[in-house]
Each structure stands twice: as structure tokens, then as C-alpha cells.
Image (cartoon, rainbow, N blue to C red):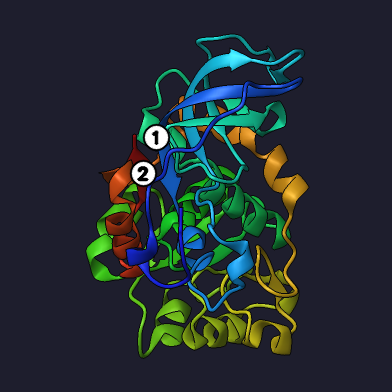
Amino acid sequence: MATAFGGPEVLAVEDVALSDPGPREVHVAVRASGVNPADAKSYRGPGDPAKLPVLLGYEAAGVVAAVGDGAADDAGPLAVGDEVVVFRTRGAYAADLVVPDHTLTRKPAGLGWPEAAGLMLAGATAVHTLEATGVQEGDTVLVHGASGGVGLYAVQLARLRGARVVATAGEQNHDLLRELGAEPVVYGDGLLDRVRRLAPEGVDAALDLVGSDEAMDVSLALVERDRIASIANFTRGPQEGIRLLGGGPGADAGDELRAAARPELARLAGEGRLRVLVAATYPLDDAAAAHRQIATGHTTGKIALVP
């Protein structure tokens, strides 16, 4: 948890009493917790001291340790020993959680704990961007920030829909993006011309996952506004009439859509059709180091905490 507003130095691990699960609740013994940029933003401040401490973490994966009356997920009644993914919750940086059953999805048997913990938030966000821009078979999609947590899912899910993907990323990540079926292009000066050369027939949709002026300018030059979505540019997005997604001011949170995406994301990951790339794992009591890595903006794949 964050005991104050500031940087990673304010993070601490504390013992908290856990209640028994009530009706439609489940006690989950956590095996891994997903780390996301939104976690760090939640305590960056300045903020209201009355809201402290800030519990961190929106997603986790673990084993059912106890079940309240009537607890079930979309696959049926839950039982002790079931392996599950938790999303969306609050306070997922923990060794144990008691959560409502509607936050649970069965973990695919072949998926590791860090992978399962990093699947849902970024994966559901990627689904939201594709739905918001109407990406379908035959489209050419420009993904800005394709090597980030959301970007790697967006690339794969767009390809599964039969779309062509042009992906901006640093050159060190181009081989990975090619493996995932994208056509990478380096960002920076001249990006618009490089994309036009790569896709002379045009671009149908653009996903801004970085929030830079470059991403906005290039998207506006190539794509109709109603097929551009941003999860990051909450300054220019409203001015340009771009659809904003997520938790920022004026954005479409898409809670129902994102929740509905969970079973399909689990199925695709379990079948190996959706790769979950884990960049690093840290002990739970070293969450500050994980947040420092996230803050660099250059992490390829997901970070997980392990109790």
C-alpha cells in the first residue's frame, strides 16, 4: 500500500486482518499480482490525506482457499483448490484476498502465475481499443506504443481479427513485433512518411497507447477521427474529438465491455494463441523496485509481484 502521496519510496507492506468470505465471496491465496502504470498513478499526488493509505493492484492470480455461500463464476460453482484470475479488484498487491465472485475467471491450466496475473487489465484495455475503433478483418491498424503492456495485446488481438498491424516501437523491439505478426516502424521524426510508405493504400484505424503529440498528429493525418482511440492523451484528445478510453477525465471506462472480455482472453491465452510476455517479477515487499521499472516507460511485457 501507499502510506503517503509521492514516489515509490512511500510504499509499504502491512499486515491487515482478513475477514471470512461472505455470500458470493471467495478467499484467494495469491500466487502473483499484476503491476500496471495505473498503480503508480494512484498515489502520485498531490492527494487528499483522508484517502490514505491507498491500496494498490487491480489484478492477481491465485488459488481458492475458502468459498462463501453461492460463490460461482461464469464456469460454475467455485471450490477450494480452483485456480483463478482476479480482475477487477482493489488491493491486489497482497498474499491473500477476499473478493466478490464476479471478479473471478478460471485460470487456464497451462498459464504460469505471473502470466495469469498480467493478462486481464492490459488485455481487456486492448479489447476496448479495438472495439471502440471497429477493427475488423481486412483493416490496417496503426498501433502507437506497440511494445508496451497494452500494445502487445492489441497487436495480437488485431491480428486474430484478421487485421494488418503497423506498429510503432523502438528498434530493439522490432523482432518481437514481427514474431507477433506486426510490421514495425520506428517512432520519431519522419514517422508519418514511414507509415505512408509502409501502408500506401491507407490506414483504417489508429490506437494511441502513448499519449504523445507525435502519435496524435500522425493518427489525425492518416485516419478519420471516429476511428482513432487514445488511452493516454487526455489533453489533446478532447480538443481533437478523439475517443478517450480508460480512467482519465472524460474517458469511456468501458467497465462492462472489459469485464465481458475476460473469458475470451483466458481462453486465447490458455490455447497459446495470445502470448503473455513477462518482463520481470519482484517479491511483494519490493513493489517499489517494480514501480521504478514501470516508470522508465521502456518495459517490454508485464511485471508481476510474487508473495
| Disc nearer the start of the sequence (1/2) | 1
| Residue drawn at 67 percent across, 52 percent down | 136
Dot 1: within a 10 Å radius of its alpha carbon, few (fewer than 14), some, or many (20 or more) residues?
many
Residue 12: x, y in percent?
37, 53
Residues at badges 1 and 2 in contact (C-beta under 8 Å)?
A: yes
Residue 263 appears in the picture as rendered: no
Q: Quadrant of residue 130?
A: bottom right
Residue holding disc 2: 304
Up-down relation of residue 134 to residue 78 (above or below)? below
Query: Which of the pair 252/305 is nearer the observer?
Result: 305
Indicate the amino acid at tag 1: Ala
| Residue drawn at 53 percent across, 51 percent down | 55
Query: Which of the pair 181/5 is nearer the observer?
Result: 5
Judged left or right of residue 180, residue 92 is right
Up-down relation of residue 136 to residue 208 (above or below)? above
Residue holding disc 1: 32
Judged left or right of residue 235, residue 113 is left
| Residue drawn at 54 percent across, 79 percent down | 46
Residue 85 appears in the picture as rendered: yes
Mark 1 element type: strand
